[in-house]
Each structure stands twice: as C-alpha cells, then as structure tokens.
Image (cartoon, helix red, strand yellow):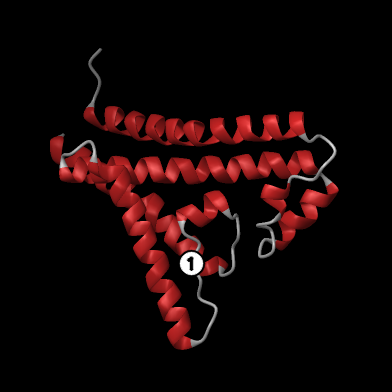
Amino acid sequence: IRMPIKTYIMKTYIYNFLAGGVFVIIPLLINIVLWMLVRPVFAMNYISAGLANFIFLSDLFVKSPLLFHVIHLFIVFIGGGLIASFSLYLNTKFNNKYIGFLLVLVIDLLASLIFYFVSIILNKDIVLVSLRSLLVEMSFSNLLISLIYLLTIFLIPIYYLYKLAKRRY
C-alpha cells in the first residue's frame, strides 16, 4: 500500500508511542494482578512506599484504589511512550536500530545527575523527574522543571520527524 511519507511517519510515530506504552503496562498489570492474588488484604506497599512526594495520589490511593491504579497505569503508559518515541528519534537520527533505547536511558540519567548536582550547589530543591522516576517512583518534586523536561522529550521527536517528512517530500 502506497501512502504519502508524512502519513507514514505520523503513523509510525503514533504506533511506536502506543507500542512503547503497552509494553511498559503489561508487566505492571501482571505485577498488580499477582500482588492482588497473593496478598489481597494488604496495601500495595511497592506503590505506597514511593508516594511521599506525590501527595494528591497518596490521598487518592487511600480513597479510591481503583482510580489510583487507572491513573498510575496512564502515567506509566505515557512514560513508556515517551521512551519509545525518543528512542525512535535517536534510532532515525543515528541510522542505527540498537543505539536508541540505551542512549535514552543515558541521556535521562545524565539529566537527572546534572539537576541533582545543581540542586546541591544551589542548595535548592531542583530535582528533575526523570523518565525512570516517572515509571518507578511516581514522584513530582518540582513540577515546572519536570514538565518542561518531559515536554522536551515529547516534542523533539515530533519536530525531527516533521522535518524529516518535509525533507523527503
């Protein structure tokens, strides 16, 4: 089936984002189901331990665990999609299908370390929510900086793929 390059690139990006989100959610769903099968009366300690900085979700966890899990799955889905789409950008940019995922994690780790050292030097709480923190800890200590970082991770691949489609069209 022939289609315009812009449509192909847009569909590739969307499918890649969705696949990344789904592949991150599947192990989490298996984990939640197994936890509920083994310990149905106990609180989900692996989640509640990381809620110290995520106040509104900790209240939601107590009031409505089902809604909490739906929101938690959505956040994890977005994080997986961001990792997958940034990997797609890096794989396309460097024309290598193996470097993308590793480079995303390295960039994410370096950004977290830089913000950690800046917060120590300035003696302020400028902690960045890295993609790993978004998936594992679900804590937002500085919402504005984290939102800018996550939007950058989201918009760079879109801009690059848009330019790529325009160049090849």
- For the residue pair 150 and 103, the one nearer the viewer reads as 103
Location of residue 73 by image quarter: top right
Q: As drawn, which residue projects farthest toward the top?
A: 1
State the residue at coordinates (40%, 33%). 14
State the residue at coordinates (85%, 38%). 41
**Residue 110 screen position, x and y as percent:** 34, 64
Is 134 positioned to the left or the right of 62 in the image? left
**Residue 10 screen position, x and y as percent:** 33, 33
Element at label 1: loop
Label 1 crowd bin: few (<14), some (14–19), many (20+), radius 10 Å? many
**Residue 168 screen position, x and y as percent:** 14, 36
Q: Amino acid at mark 1?
A: Leu
| Residue 1 drawn above or below residue 87 | above
Name the residue tied to disc 1.
128
Marker count (numbered)? 1
Quadrant assignment for the C terminus: top left
Q: As drawn, which residue projects farthest toward the front?
A: 38
State the residue at coordinates (53%, 83%). 124
**Residue 82 screen position, x and y as percent:** 43, 45
Quadrant assignment for the N terminus: top left
| Residue 140 drawn above or below residue 166 | below
State the residue at coordinates (67%, 48%). 46
